[in-house]
Amino acid sequence: MSEHDNIEANKETLGFQTEVKQLLHLMIHSLYSNKEIFLRELISNASDAEDKLRFEALSNDALYENDGDLKIRLGFDAEAKTVTIADNGIGMSRDEVIAHLGTIAKSGTADFMKNLTGDSQKDSHLIGQFGVGFYSAFIVAKKVEVFTRKAGADKSEGVLWSSEGEGEFEIASIERETRGTEIVLHLKDDEAEFADGWRLRSLVKKYSDHIAFPVIMQSEPAPAAEGEEQKEPEDETVNEATALWTLSKSEVKDEDYKAFYKHISHDFQDPMTWSHNRVEGKLDYTSLLYIPAKAPFDLYNREVPRGLKLYVQRVFIMDEAEQFLPLYLRFVKGIVDTRDLSLNVSREILQSDKVVESMKSALTKRILDMLSKMAKNEPENYQKFWDEFGDVMKEGLGEDFSNKEKLAKLLRFASTHGDSTKTVSLEDYVSRMQESQEKIYYISAESHGAGTSSPHMEIFRKKGIEVLVLSDRIDGWMISHLNEFDGKHMQDITKGELDLGDIDAEEEKKQQEEASKTFENLIGQIKELLKDKVEDVRVTNRLTDSPACLVAGAHDMDAQMKKIMEAAGQVVPETKPSFEINPEHPLVKQLNDEQNDERFNDLTYVLFDQAALASGEQLKEPGAFVSRLNKLLLDLSK
């Protein structure tokens, strides 16, 4: 039986995971305008395979199989229209081939697919954030073959994977002398331009010059002159093959930093900014940290793997070493290379290592300083950053006490000052505070519109006092960890009795006292009627246009936080609000003059329910509210 017959005999045909089929289709159409990135992605994967072998071989030198010269080979055949990328890295077993080349093992994949719009331009950014790697080969190839063998496995355990990128792939066992992976791209007829030495070399220089392993191609000697002997092709390295982070900043161009970011992140967009730093002294390490331009699709999933690439003395140790950054900075990409850890360090050891803790503290400070610099010198860029990553930055208030002050300065809030689409810093707010203002006022609401239209805003609008509008789901939790800023107490305008201090004129305070006496009987009647619903009833100093409002206790949970806790299935403690009435409002005056007990009760309940609705609460008895309101409307029409 021939080798070909043997392969045919043990060949198995399997179907792609549904998401892979969708992604392949979308990618081929969405990324076609940027098709040359396929080479960057495949060389990047080959580099990762070399890195992983070098790490595994630290504890098992036999994996090198007497060949420790790690390199990536790039070849082509113009006549056959093929491009070949080969590495002598870790390789794959049959199970690994099926897992890596037939499925997308990413949490949130289904959610990602739902976000795709069908618009090629928009989807290309999403696909870039998701990361495509190997599958980018099908942008230019009508068929892809993968020959691989796991390092240390018997030569009979080689695997051949092939597919035309439609709905299925074939897999077979083969004999393979060498470890590692060789990918053969059979180019589409209109993509033959890539089966060209000059084209491939230029792409390596453009996208993969920074790869730390040599990318080898055969030289193409010019035809010999008459009478001269034709030179034989020789191996030549077409990239710099130097770990970019080991170079000094002056030696690295911006284009190189951007290319390296794309290599480690598989993002298609340039990063927003980066920081390259060498630390010597008590700690000895190099870091290269990037802030992406766009948030990944799974940013809010705190369980997904994330972290920096860890190298020890230029030897790759692990991907996604999460121990070097706090969770709220999980969007940061980059590498850290240190001399202060051993080559056989594990994730478990990292968790309790004092050197790692020191590095984590220093790296966190570096990122926050980088962001502070951006906020000061490039406010428009910082606004873009905040729009993408602001909500996860807020998590830091409760998780990183040592950097609380730095984080507070980086926070941005919607505000009643100026353009509602722009956010303000707490420093901005404090600089605009009125002369006698002692507190930073804010309101928590379900949406920006609900916050700005809340009855609680009326007195602040009248007096021109700026109020921060908190409408993101995390804001209620975040603000509980931020009691003050720059010596100014944070005050929720929907809680407790409102004390505007010296901003309230003496005359206004006197008027409120007099109104409380004038409406003393009315307050007593309402309090008796609503005794099961309210903690207290009092005359308000908050309202100018509305008849009444509900006010939570100074230490009670606001309506937004209650909703979040209830949605999470947590038990929310039962509290009663205070009911504040506006003595200047015609409905309150009418209530004070009302002689009919039934109508008095109906009007009081309607005012109470209206105030609850304005606070963002859901009515417990909406039917009763509608019935009372209709009855009052009918009375008016008589």
Image: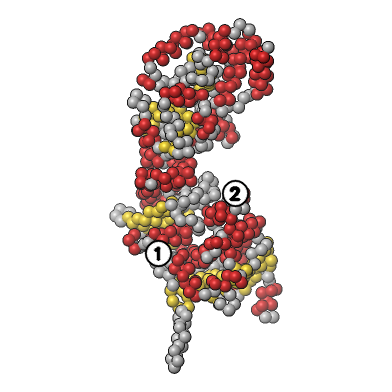
- Front-most of residues 291 and 379: 379
The x and y percentages for residue 233 are 47, 82
Instruction: Identify the image quadrant of residue 77.
Output: bottom right
Residue at x-position 41% and y-position 20%: 499
Q: Residue furthest left?
A: 281
Residue 26, disc: none
Element assignment for label 1: loop
Q: Amino acid at mark 2?
A: Asn
The x and y percentages for residue 83 are 55, 72
Given this view, does label 1 or label 2 mark the residue nearer the observer?
A: 2
For marks 1 and 2, the one nearer the N-term is 2
Residue at x-position 66% and y-position 74%: 7
Residue at x-position 58% and y-position 70%: 191
The x and y percentages for residue 39 are 52, 66
The quarter of the picture where the C terminus appears is top right
Q: Which residue is mark 1?
A: 243
What whole-number distance in Å separates the C-alpha atoms at marks 1 and 2? 36 Å
| 629 is higher (above) or lower (below) than 295 | above
Callout 2 environment at 10 Å: few (<14), some (14 to 19), or many (20+)? few
| 245 is higher (above) or lower (below) than 452 | below
Say if residue 265 shows up in the picture: yes
Q: Amino acid at mark 1?
A: Ala
| 23 is higher (above) or lower (below) than 571 | below
Instruction: Identify the image quadrant of residue 346.
Output: bottom left
Q: Residue furthest top?
A: 595
- Front-most of residues 306 and 260: 260
Q: Which residue is mark 2?
A: 115
Callout 1 environment at 10 Å: few (<14), some (14 to 19), or many (20+)? some
The x and y percentages for residue 390 are 46, 42
- Front-most of residues 313 and 102: 102
